[in-house]
Amino acid sequence: MGGINRTSETRKGGNKGIQRTNKTVLAELRSKHRSGGLSPGEASSIILFGNHEHMDEVKLFGRGPRDRHEAIMDGMADGMVWACSDSRVGAIGTNDEMIILEQRSAGNSFAFPDTRSHRIQMAVIGRVRRGGLLAIAGHVSCGAVQAKADLDAQGPDAKTGNAELDAQLREVVGDSEEKNVLSQTCRLREANSTMGKLVVGVMLDWASEGVAYSVLDGGRGMPGPSLQQPFVGASELHAIHAQSENYLERMKGQSPHTIIVAPATIPYSVHTIVQSEPGEVFVVTGTSPYKATQSQREDNDLSLDYPALGSLYYPIEHLGTRNVIFLDDDANPELLKSKFAAWEKGLRALKHKGEEFVARLIDEGKLQLTKMVYELDSGKIREFP
Ligand SMILES: [Zn+2]
């Protein structure tokens, strides 16, 4: 699935002149994205440029990707956040020392019990240490909450045109972002009743001056300053971007150039791995809990669950996003091949009102799909053959 512009490779060698050139190219590509008309290949160039920044950054970190990966495997992640896939919701865990896993779906819901999605999310929660943070994070002007409210207004049998999105929206609750956060937080708190983790509900608001998050429901005690750090970090990132041109205007809607599908157990936020700006990348997680032992993994169903598929449908159908990247940090090429094949099958089978429109877009060369591996030793993402 070629089409990726490799100009970022010219950056090797640390030549400052070339770096400046790349920064200029990146600024031009971002400007083109804002005015519309970015090609999928150009979108992938932005992703690869951003990943080079990440590779430089991890060299300075105390704990690199492999250390973090091993801590996650050992069940020592510091927290997990259910955030919306919305491209305006940037990285949550921006702190080098903390490991915050991100579950991303349209409408930041915690899955209903007795569903496969619930089992997957519980398996990921198992990677969070005792006393760690579990947080439902909603955000202002959430398209999924609006879609849910619109469906409810049309009656109990109303449909979106896509079965997986219908199933996902059934898990979104209420006619406001706050109600949805509070309801998801209650559901998560019930699931956590014996696990000894701290559950909070948070609202992200990039339109506010200064603080961009607030704790809506601290439940049994507000998180201490250290556990609030991921949200302080997210606020600081927004504060930096808020100084850029037309920021608030741009944050009113979203038109992501790329969708990235990744496991919630990847060592950093996907937004950190590709250094994306708010509004660029729509992130979807949700797949089988393959981060178990090898024999358990082989027994697993590797396909994407319905929140992931519904969340994938939304930007392709409604936002016109035409660049999809599958990203995984698994080192086993055979497993990766099977997993990516299962993901692709799910993507191609997505229907809009009965028509397999995504398969058609791929076959007509209008939607680019690239499979990529995140290398734990370098932080680099490379195309999977
Ligand atoms: Zn949202």
Image: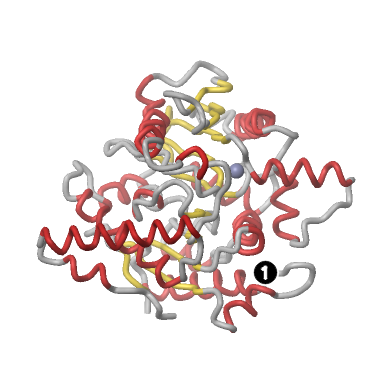
Per the image, the residue denoted by label 1 is: 350
SS for tag 1? loop
The residue most toward the top is 221
In terms of image quadrants, where is residue 312?
Answer: bottom right
Pick the front one: 69 or 173: 173
Q: Quadrant of the N terminus?
A: bottom left
- Is residue 364 among what the camera can see? yes
* Residue 54 higher or lower than 220, as above or below: below
| Left or right: residue 368 compared with residue 190 | left
* Residue 85 higher or lower than 138, as above or below: below
- Is residue 78 among what the camera can see? no
Amino acid on which the number 1 mark rests in the picture: Leu
| Left or right: residue 298 compared with residue 109 | left
* Residue 365 higher or lower than 169, as above or below: below
Task: State the residue at coordinates (25%, 57%).
Answer: 23
User: Residue 177, position in %: x, y?
Assistant: 65, 33
User: Residue 218, position in %: x, y?
Assistant: 54, 20
Ligand 1 placement by image quarter = top right
Task: State the residue at coordinates (39%, 57%).
Answer: 30
In terms of image quadrants, where is residue 53?
Answer: bottom left
| Left or right: residue 107 compared with residue 79 | right
Number of numbered labels in the structure image: 1
Colour mode? secondary structure
In terms of image quadrants, where is residue 379?
Answer: bottom left
* Residue 251 higher or lower than 382, as above or below: above
User: Residue 151, position in %: x, y?
Assistant: 81, 47
Q: Quadrant of the C terminus?
A: bottom left
Task: State the residue at coordinates (15%, 64%).
Answer: 18
- Mark 1: few, some, or many residues within 10 Å (few <14, many ≥20)? many
Task: State the residue at coordinates (51%, 56%).
Answer: 256
